[in-house]
């Protein structure tokens, strides 16, 4: 059985943050050279570092 490949939307990842110094979004994970190349090219699928960025999750737990 083959796993279905899925695309990763970096915009919803909690590791994708705005860098005010450079004025653009960056991945805060330490990517190796090959991973960084795929990330910059926009072909970084099935990212092992992807974490859904739900900033309200903690608030919901506190209610």
Image (cartoon, grey):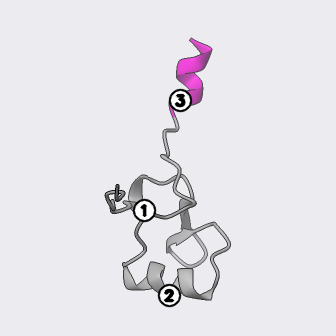
The answer to whether the residues at label 3 and label 2 have Cβ atoms under 8 Å apart is no
Which residue, given by chain and number where applicable, does mark 3 sit on? 57
Mark 1 or mark 3: whose residue is earlier in sequence: 1
Is 4 situated left or right of 50 in this image?
Answer: left
Q: Quadrant of the N terminus?
A: bottom left
- Looking at the image, residue 61 lies above or below residue 48: above
Q: CA distance from mark 2 to mark 1?
A: 15 Å
Residue placed furthest toward the right: 30
Q: Residue at x 42, y 62 (%)?
A: 10
Q: CA distance from mark 1 to mark 3?
A: 18 Å
The answer to if 60 sits in the magenta stretch is yes
- Looking at the image, residue 15 lies above or below residue 63: below
Q: Quadrant of residue 17?
A: bottom right
Which residue, given by chain and number where applicable, does mark 1 sit on? 10
Which residue, given by chain and number where applicable, does mark 2 sit on? 37
In this view, the residue in front, 50 or 25, is 50
Q: Residue at x 62, y 66 (%)?
A: 28
Magenta range: 56-63
Q: Secondary structure at mark 3?
A: helix
Q: CA distance from mark 3 to mark 2?
A: 32 Å
């Amino acid at each position: 059985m083959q796993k279905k490949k899925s695309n990763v939307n970096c915009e919803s990842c909690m590791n994708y943050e705005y860098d005010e110094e450079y004025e653009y979004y960056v991945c805060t994970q330490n990517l190796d050279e090959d991973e960084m190349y795929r990330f910059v090219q926009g072909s970084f699928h099935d990212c092992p570092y992807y974490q859904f960025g739900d900033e309200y999750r903690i608030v919901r737990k506190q209610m």
